Image (spheres, rainbow, N blue to C red):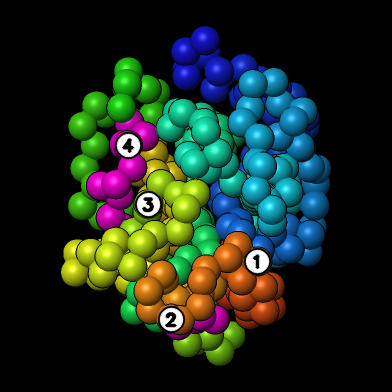
Amino acid sequence: MTPQQKLSDCYESVKGKLNGFVPKVALILGSGLGALADEIDVVTTIDYSDIDGFPQSTVQGHKGRFVFGKIGEVPVVIMQGRVHFYEGYSMNDTVLPVRLMRKLGAEILFLTNAAGGISFGAGEFMLITDHISTFVPSPLIGANMEEFGVRFPDMSAIYDKKLNSIISSAAEKVGVNLKKGIYVQATGPNFESPAEVQMFKRLGGDAVGMSTACEAMVANHAGMKVCGISCISNLACGLSDNPLTHDEVMEAADASAPMFKKLIKSAIEAMVNE
């Protein structure tokens, strides 16, 4: 089955369960950040396992379902758990959820992740201004999906400046000291080596993780406005004396969750009011 056929099948499967609901904002929740989806005005939920051919989340902290509902008056679709390249999926399957949410009507993609801090410490939030993804395959390799965008899309402004300005204002409003920086996507699932972290630092990276950049590229290709926030869950490898663990990532994300939820809700409502 081609990626186009798989996307079409997933779209038909999901659309029939929405009773005309059309999301405006698509929100992907990273490791340990999924609790926000439990606090919105829910219209319906759809488990990934109930969508034929849809990739499944296999990582702790990722529930594996779409949540459709409203944040304030804003219709949203939330991925309560994303799909990662390191889980063994093709890159086309990894980004299929983003294309599906676009096809369902979403105009804005709001990305979140738990990331290792290169320039920032655990517990801080980083507004993503750009990314480095040279270390993972481009999600646009293969036959171009003409319904979404051109063969050779421009990537000079992936993260929308107006949305970033709105998020910055929302951060001030809710009392979050929001940093700004460049996110680096590595393949995972292993944490990076100290030498790799130093390389990322020399390249200009401020935080490193195992997702996000590929999703942002696909959304940009499809004409979506893109923005993203990293929750710094730990210092990147070699910057502290402690070995890295996924439990540490989850604990830090849980601790940051209350402020994170306030920031996301405030930003999304402001985006649509603009």
Residue of label 2: 240
Between 87 and 6, which is closer to the camera in this rendering? 87
**Which mark identifies residue 137?**
4
Between 89 and 34, which is closer to the camera in this rendering? 89
Disc 2 is placed on an element classified as loop
Crowding around mark 1 (Cα neighbors within 10 Å: few <14, some 14 to 19, many 20+) is few
Q: Is residue 52 above or below residue 163?
A: above
Query: Which residue appears at 45% of the width and 69% of the height?
Result: 116
Crowding around mark 3 (Cα neighbors within 10 Å: few <14, some 14 to 19, many 20+) is many
The x, y position of residue 190, in whole percent, is 47, 53
**Which mark identifies residue 247?**
1
The reply to whether the C-beta atoms of the residues labelled 2 and 3 are less than 8 Å apart is no
Marks 4 and 3 sit apart, C-alpha to C-alpha, by: 10 Å
**Which mark identifies residue 159?**
none
Q: Is residue 157 visible?
A: yes
Marks 4 and 1 sit apart, C-alpha to C-alpha, by: 28 Å
Magenta residues (range): 121-140
Disc 4 or 2, which lies upstream in sequence? 4
Query: Which residue appears at 33% of the width and 42% of the height?
Result: 136
Type of amino acid under label 3: Ala
Q: Residue furthest top?
A: 1
Between 169 and 27, which is closer to the camera in this rendering? 27
Quadrant hosting residue 128: bottom left
Type of amino acid under label 4: Pro
Disc 2 or 1, which lies upstream in sequence? 2
Type of amino acid under label 2: Ser
